[in-house]
Amino acid sequence: MEDQPSTPVLMFVAHRDVESRVMVALAEAGLDDITSAQSRLMQRLDPAGMRLTDLAEQARVTKQTAGALVDQLERAGYVMRRPDPSDARARLVTLSERGLAACSAAAAEVARVEQEWRRHLGDTAYRGLRNALIALRAVTDPYR
């Protein structure tokens, strides 16, 4: 084990592979104008819509960075801004039809990857991996 990377690095390597495959799938679906940074922001977007400040916090970027990325996504037709029904002064960022299509294409690729992992590891090991990662959310995911 000493010659192997740490567990967090191994998790990052697996995540990076999935992220790369999702970006290829998006490009193949004709959605090749989404950058990795934009994709990471879209991953955190609540389907009901989110305020920019909440989106920035969850994506761990500054409000200015989130605003610039949302501006780009809005110009490309992936998101929309609409009034927040709970506060007339605030706006919510929501997915457009094109954004929903991108999320659908991404989800389909993630499902393919998970099927490959299950075949590679076997059902028991895959379930164990998934259960362990779900248990880790209690100490790693403040947005769970």
Image (tube, grey):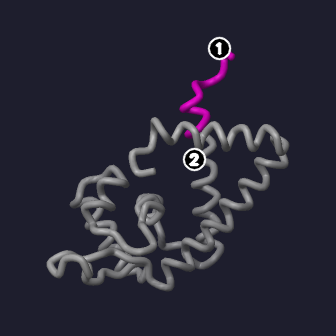
In the image, taking residue 1 as reference, residue 5 lies left or right, namely left
- Residue 81 badge: none
| 143 in relation to 2, above or below | below
| 95 in relation to 19, above or below | below
> Which three-letter amino acid code belongs to the residue tagged 2?
Arg
Name the quadrant containing residue 76.
bottom left
Is 28 part of what is drawn in magenta? no
| 88 in relation to 116, above or below | below
Residue at 65%, 14% (x, y): give it: 2
Mark 1 highlights which residue?
A: 2
Residue at 59%, 70% (x, y): give it: 26
From the viewer's side, name the closer residue of 22 and 138: 138
Q: Quadrant of the N terminus?
A: top right
In the image, taking residue 142 as reference, residue 34 lies left or right, namely right
Give x and y (percent) for residue 135.
Answer: 57, 38
From the viewer's side, name the closer residue of 53 and 127: 127
Specify few, some or many for label 2: CA neighbours under 10 Å numbering under 14, 14-19, or 20 or more: few
Specify few, some or many for label 1: CA neighbours under 10 Å numbering under 14, 14-19, or 20 or more: few
Give x and y (percent) for residue 81.
Answer: 30, 80
Name the quadrant containing residue 129.
top right
Label 2: which secondary element? helix
Residue at 58%, 25% (x, y): give it: 6
Q: Earlier in the sequence, mark 1 or mark 2?
A: 1
Give x and y (percent) for residue 67.
Answer: 26, 66
Mark 2 highlights which residue?
A: 16
Residue at 66%, 17% (x, y): give it: 3
Is 6 part of what is drawn in magenta? yes
Query: From which residue to which does the magenta span run?
Result: 1-12
In the image, taking residue 114 as reference, residue 44 lies left or right, namely left
